[in-house]
Image (spheres, rainbow, N blue to C red):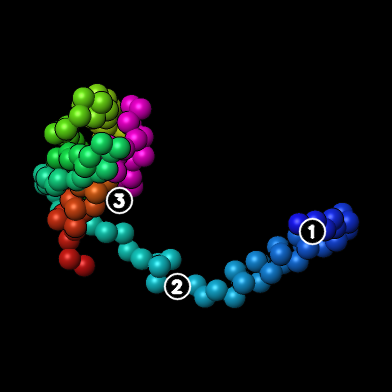
Amino acid sequence: MIVQTLSPAVRSGAVLAAVIGALTVTGCAGTDASADSAEPVEYADGTYTAEGSYQTPENVERVSVTLTIADNLVAGVEVAGDPGARETEQYQAAFISGIATEIVGVPLDEIDVSRVAGSSLTSGGFNAAVAEIKAQAALEQ
């Protein structure tokens, strides 16, 4: 094995060149003006239900999510689990007990949970169901 040691000046120069190169590439990237000026999605008021699934170490688990939407905000939430493992039952119960405080009153477009009451895997199924609900509730524009 050959090991080559660079002097601090050479290392600093290499780092500076890499940073300048990255900035140059980033600066050359085009911007999409339509993405910056996109109108927010409007959602029809109502109650919507969708299913979401997620992978655990043991198997695929499912949750059913019902959201009530009013003025593009989440006005209510119900989540029902169907756990296949005892540990999943504990995590789903914790998630279900804590989800309302996380999302009620929040705009539907801002809902993207990662961990609720110590449960991180359940959020994957929940987020998948929310994506389906967004598609169901979106108004034609």
Q: Secondary structure at mark 1?
A: loop
Residue at the spot of label 3: 109
Q: Relative to residue 139, is residue 105 depicted above or below?
A: above
Tell me residue 25's x, y (percent).
62, 72
Residue occupying the point 88% across, 56% down:
7
Q: At label 1, which amino acid type do we have?
A: Ile
Residue pointed to by mark 1? 2
Callout 1 crowding tier (Cα within 10 Å): few <14, some 14–19, many ≥20: few
Task: Return the x and y of residue 1 as percentages of the image width and height.
Answer: 76, 57
**Rendered position, 3 above or below 124:** below
Disc nearer the start of the sequence (3/2): 2
Q: CA distance from mark 2 to mark 1?
A: 47 Å
Q: Which residue type does callout 3 highlight?
A: Asp
Q: Nearer the viewer, residue 129 or 58?
A: 58
Q: What residue is shown at x 18% (from left), y 51% (from top)?
A: 133
Residue at 32% across / 63% down in the picture? 39
The percent coordinates of residue 78 (x first, y second) are 16, 34
Q: Is 64 part of what is drawn in magenta?
A: no
The residue stretch that appears in magenta: 106-126
Q: Inspect this view and state whether residue 69 appears.
A: no
**Crowd class of label 3 (few under 14; some 14 to 19; many from 20; radius 10 Å):** some
Q: Amino acid at mark 2?
A: Asp
